[in-house]
Image (spheres, rainbow, N blue to C red):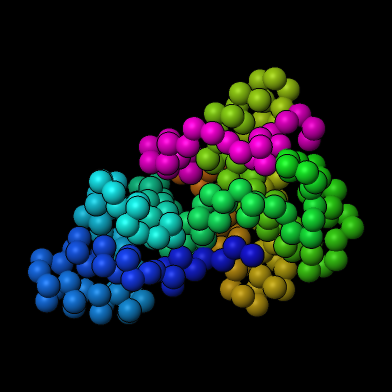
Amino acid sequence: MITPNCRERLTASDFEFIAGTLGAGRNNSSTLAQLLTDEEMRDTILDSETLFQAVLQGDAQLRISPQCYFYILLRHVLKDRGISNRETCDYLASLLENFSVTERMRAPGGAGHGTQQYVSDLLLALQKASPSQSFLLRAHIGNYTLFISGVFQDRVESRSRRGGPDMGFFEGVGAANFHSAAGHPFARQHALSPVFEELSERFHDLRLALNETAERHLHLDEAPSLILGGMTNEE
């Protein structure tokens, strides 16, 4: 289950990188590290333009955790696009962190088979799912379609020209399932409903933000077979 918890999982290396980037000296760096334990101050610090530029340079992504790296990148891109909710940014960063490992993209409950995963299989699995399984599947479908259409836009568009599902299909299915997930008691219990509602309502805008992030900062050249399986004309 993906949750917006990247900011809560900053590592010692992340603290060292942030303090070293923004601190003018040893004493200031120590004070900055202490401030990062305060949630409000931490969020303000993570919004720093200086920090964003530092993440883009050198070996920063090798020195910090994936959750820190993705959050800082996405926060900058989303703010530029008028999407200011930190929880939504945190959720998307967690999504990128999780789905950057192919095995973590597997649907809950064994929906989908083999090395590939089709959106059609996930939608069919909903018909037999229990209420709790239905919530997990709907959240996964939203996550999966947003990740595919956001990070692998060129592949979606290329395959749609050969009869595969187009971008409108992924946006429609993803937005609808995020909306359904938002109304589930589990989402309300864990304060996920507002995030899922924004993911649903602004799916298109968030997809474009991921397109920009992938094109400018991630430079992904190969899509694993699990992802490609979600983009055939089987849907």
Quarter of the C terminus within the rendering: top right
Is residue 202 among the parts visible in the rendering?
A: no
Taking depth in this image into account, of 83 and 107 the one nearest to the observer is 107
The answer to if 232 sits in the magenta stretch is yes
Percent x, y of residue 108: 74, 59
Percent x, y of residue 65: 40, 60
Percent x, y of residue 138: 73, 57
Taking depth in this image into account, of 117 and 138 the one nearest to the observer is 117
- Quick check: 125 left or right of 217? right
Quarter of the N terminus within the rendering: bottom right
- Quick check: 135 left or right of 152? right
Q: Residue at x 32, y 66 (%)?
A: 13
- Quick check: 175 left or right of 85? right
The answer to if 52 sits in the magenta stretch is no
Locate residue 159: give its quadrant: top right
- State the extent of the magenta-drawn residues as a range: 210-235
Percent x, y of residue 25: 10, 69
Q: Residue at x 64, y 40 (%)?
A: 227
Secondary structure mostly seen in magenta is: helix
